[in-house]
Amino acid sequence: MSHTKVDSRDVEPIADGLRFLRDPLDCEKLGVSVLEADPGWTGKEHDHAEDGQEEVYVLLDGSATVTVDGEDVSLESGEALRISPDATRQIRNGDTESTFVLVGASGE
């Protein structure tokens, strides 16, 4: 089939409102997730140096800070942030609920 459609709200969240859509969408090379973060939520610091995954975080609603290699990058609704695979990153949500679309793919 040339396309797959999924309602992200039907995908069971793995933790704290994070829904991985890669498998339900049958993606082969692209990871897509939706994150609905509660006020004050903080994500896990991590990088993708081992798997080479470049990521883009799109903030659809709310405000948040993403710490990239120790530098705080403020995001407001409608803004997007690209992060290289070897950079550490951690999302810290602001004072209201926020909704992100997180997209990642390796260079292979």
Image (cartoon, rainbow, N blue to C red):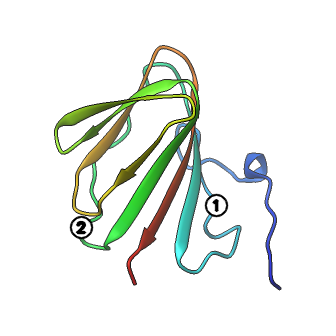
Q: Name the residue furthest left.
A: 70
The mark found on residue 47 in the picture is: none
**Picture quarter containing residue 98?**
top right
User: Could you tell whether 33 is left or right of 64 in the image?
Assistant: right
Residue named by callout 1: 21
Name the secondary structure under disc 2: loop
Please say whether residue 92 is visible from this viewpoint. Answer: yes
Residue named by callout 2: 49
Q: Position of residue 71 (x, y in %)?
A: 20, 35
Q: Is residue 91 above or below residue 98?
A: below
Q: Residues within 10 Å of mark 1 (few under 14, many from 20)?
A: many
Residue at the (29%, 46%) spot, across then down: 89
Of 76 and 88, nearer the camera is 76
Q: Identify the image quadrant of the C terminus.
A: bottom left
Q: Name the residue furthest top.
A: 95
The residue type indicated by label 1 comes to Leu
Q: Position of residue 62 (x, y in %)?
A: 55, 24
Residue at the (37%, 64%) spot, across then down: 54
The residue type indicated by label 2 comes to Ala
**Picture quarter containing residue 48?**
bottom left
User: Could you tell whether 10 is left or right of 99 in the image?
Assistant: right
Q: Position of residue 99 (x, y in %)?
A: 59, 34
Residue at the (80%, 53%) spot, across then down: 7
Q: Name the residue furthest front.
A: 79
